[in-house]
Image (tube, helix red, strand yellow):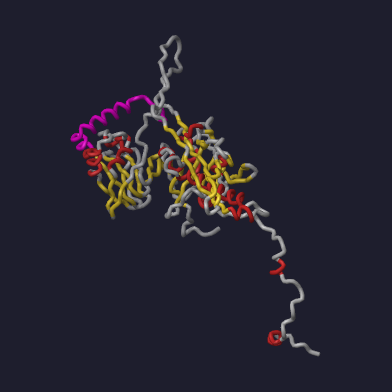
Amino acid sequence: MTVDSSPEAQAAAPALPQQSLGTAAARNLATTTKSAPQMQEITSRWLLRMLPWVETKGGAYRVNRRLRHTVGDGRIEFVQEGATVRVIPRELGELSLLRGFEDLDALTALAGRCTQRDFSAGEVLVERGTPADRIHMIAHGRVRQTSDGKYGGEIAIAVLADGDRFGENALLDADARYDYTATAETSGTLLTLSRADFAAVQAAAPSLRTHIEEFSSLARQRQNKHGEAEIAMSAGHVGEAELPGAFVDYELKPREYELSVAQTVLRVHTRVADLYNGPMNQTEEQLRLTVEALRERQEHELINNREFGLLHNADFKQRIQPHSGAPTPDDMDELLCRRRGTKLFLAHPRTIAAIGRGFNACGLYPDHVDLGGQSVPAWRGVPILPCNKIPISKEQTSSIIAMRTGEENQGVIGLRQTGLPDEYEPGLSVRFMGISEQAIISYLVTTYYSAAVLVPDALGVMENVQIARRSDQGTR
């Protein structure tokens, strides 16, 4: 006998009765194997792991330093109205010779005399050896400074970007000359203030004349290369030479870092806590994920907070620009050489990928070092650690942080206070807040933290690092 097995025949055949228990019903009697609640936000948090944490009693940490005479190292900010750019008058106080000057009328007069200049890529802004008669303040764009090398050829001096300036000494020195050539790498805008306009405002403002006299007196004081008051001493003498007297002066108003706080209120219904605690404790799992999110926020603040975050507290003399946009081994070396004992680099994972491309283009490959049993990429033996809290701009640029750590090394340190009431982890407490009339249990989850840079060269940042692949760069 021939059996018709066609789909049409099977569809027409009557359904057979169920002969065994189905899986859907069987699951009602089975205990499933399950995972603990998962969370995609959790990252490696290398910064929290690598920072040495210093106990901060009293909620504040004071950084005492030697007296420094260097002033006016900040960047200048501008306002834009269409195609017109103006300097904010108070921002002129970031210039060395105007630091601490408070006469707003005089600053406004100086800002009003600034002249806008738009430039294009490749344009030479100043020539080496020509008279310097004005200061140039970059509102937007990149400018490369070059000079003639001792052994011929052109050498790179620096790359300047938004907020930087050059030619500041021209405002007071009638004989000043440019010792470099400034060439625009991109199109952009700068504002200039001539020596003649500065002198005109100075002649009309007695307060400005007095300030300039005090500045000139301060500039004549002896300093070391870091701007600290020099400690007088004698060396190489013979016989009974008269030795100079000296003392170490301190800053009269040292900076204090107060502990910041991150908090949230965790709420759990009593019915959930009472009835659904097997095989996992619901309250513990809720608390575990809340603590993870709080630690992620803590690391974000340590990077980005405007008061104590690393990106905002790097000294302006410790900020550099990549010479060609994308990070290269030369750029990494320049960032590395600005401090002794660099402990680590921090970069966004996409920036680390760009670093790898830059190294590969030069025929180099990053080293790897063992860090807590984990192999991580490194350069010159310094680990390059990922941190997705470092922002990426809409222009696809980011930053690379380099730091020395530890109090004994005059580096970067983390600040926290342990021994808190109801402490759950070091520096983090979980306090019972009671049960509401809706039968909801509340817990206050709190962590206190901050970061301090003990000396300026402990922390450096390479800014405006291009991380996107160029359109003319093929895949490997």
Is residue 384 among what the camera can see?
no
Q: Is residue 343 left or right of residue 179?
A: right
Furthest residue in direction left, as rendered? 204
Magenta segment, which residues?
198-226
Where residue 342 appears, as percent x and y from the top left, is 53, 37
Q: Is residue 203 left or right of residue 216?
A: left
Residue in front for this viewpoint, 181 or 300: 300
Where residue 208 appears, as percent x and y from the top left, is 24, 33
Residue in front for this viewpoint, 36 or 414: 36
Furthest residue in direction top, as rendered? 240
Residue drawn 25% across and 34% down? 174
Q: Is residue 314 left or right of residue 207?
A: right
Query: In which quadrant is the C terminus drawn?
Result: bottom right
Rendered view: 222 above or below 464: above
Residue drawn 63% across and 42% down? 372
Magenta: main secondary structure: helix
Where residue 93 appears, as percent x and y from the top left, is 31, 38
Q: Is residue 334 left or right of residue 134?
A: right
Is residue 311 among what the camera can see?
yes
Q: Residue 321: within the magenta?
A: no
Furthest residue in direction right, as rendered? 1
Furthest residue in direction front, as rendered? 437
Query: In which quadrant is the N terminus drawn?
Result: bottom right
Where residue 411 appears, as percent x and y from the top left, is 50, 34
Q: Residue 209: within the magenta?
A: yes
